[in-house]
Structures are given as C-alpha cells and as structure tokens.
Image (cartoon, rainbow, N blue to C red):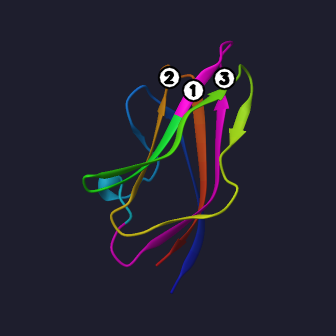
Amino acid sequence: MANAFKRESETAGTSATQMLSYTNNAVPASTEVVVIGLLASNKTTSTHYITVEIVNGSNTTTWIKDAPIPSGSSLSMMENKLVLVVGDKLQVTASAASSIDVTLSFLEIT
C-alpha cells in the first residue's frame, strides 16, 4: 500500500462544491482517504455559513450544518480524523458565492 499526503483547495459556492479531484469527485476503487484537516476561511466583511456533507450514491450525511464563520475568520472543522471509502464524496456549500475558501488535508492510501 502506498501512502501520500495531499491537499486540495476550493472556493465554496452556493451549490455543492466538490473537495476531491478524483474522477467523478469520488474516492476511487482500491483507495481510502483519511481526512486530517479541513479549514474554511471567510474572506469577506460579513459573517457567512458553511455546510459540509459526505455523499455516497443516494446517501448524504451532513457533517457540519450552517457553521458560522465571522468576517476575516477561519474555522477548523477537524477534531478527529474522518475516513472516506470507495464512492464517498466530500462537498461543501457556502451561504454566499466566493466568500469562503476551503482547504482539505488528507492521507491517500492506495
């Protein structure tokens, strides 16, 4: 098994923004992802909100719902590790377009 530390960064939109850059944005076969960091930064002058979801097929699990991020602040959303398996997608949605930058740090195991 090969291990690689990786980072993905996206600006969250008002519709679901995918955080994994795999084909179909889902964890591929023979791969596991261990999320070790998820940081959202508000780059505007107003408070905005972020929602984080894990999607697998037709199942959606809300991990964080409408968490407030004050102007110029950031929110670290990792107290423990999160394991994503084959088919899982990690998506974020912001309350306003182009307001929140999100950085995902993870260990990819193949």
Secondary structure mostly seen in magenta is: strand
Q: What residue is drawn where x is 50% and y is 22%?
A: 95
Circle 1 — which element? strand
**For discs 3 and 2, the disc positioned in front in the rendered view:** 2
Taking 100 as reference, is 38 above or below it?
below
Report the residue marked by disc 2: 95
Q: Residues within 10 Å of mark 2 (few under 14, many from 20)?
A: some
Residue 47 is situated, as x and y percent measured from the top left of the image, at 65, 18
Query: Badges 1 and 2: C-beta atoms under 8 Å apart?
Result: yes
- Residue 40 falls within the magenta-colored stretch: yes
Outermost residue toward the right in this view: 73
Q: Earlier in the sequence, mark 3 or mark 2?
A: 3
Q: What residue is drawn where x is 71% and y is 22%?
A: 70
Q: Residues within 10 Å of mark 1 (few under 14, many from 20)?
A: some
Residue 65 is situated, as x and y percent measured from the top left of the image, at 52, 36
Residue 5 is situated, as x and y percent measured from the top left of the image, at 62, 67
Which range of residues does the magenta coloring cover?
A: 28-50
Circle 3 — which element? loop
**For discs 3 and 1, the disc positioned in front in the rendered view:** 1
Amino acid carrying mark 3 in the image: Lys
Q: Is residue 42 left or right of residue 97?
A: right
Report the residue marked by disc 1: 49
Tally the marks: 3
Report the residue marked by disc 3: 43
Mark 3 and mark 2: Cα distance apart in space: 13 Å
- Residue 72 falls within the magenta-colored stretch: no
Q: Is residue 79 left or right of residue 106?
A: right
Amino acid carrying mark 1 in the image: Tyr
Q: Residues within 10 Å of mark 3 (few under 14, many from 20)?
A: some
Q: Earlier in the sequence, mark 3 or mark 1?
A: 3
Residue 35 - label? none
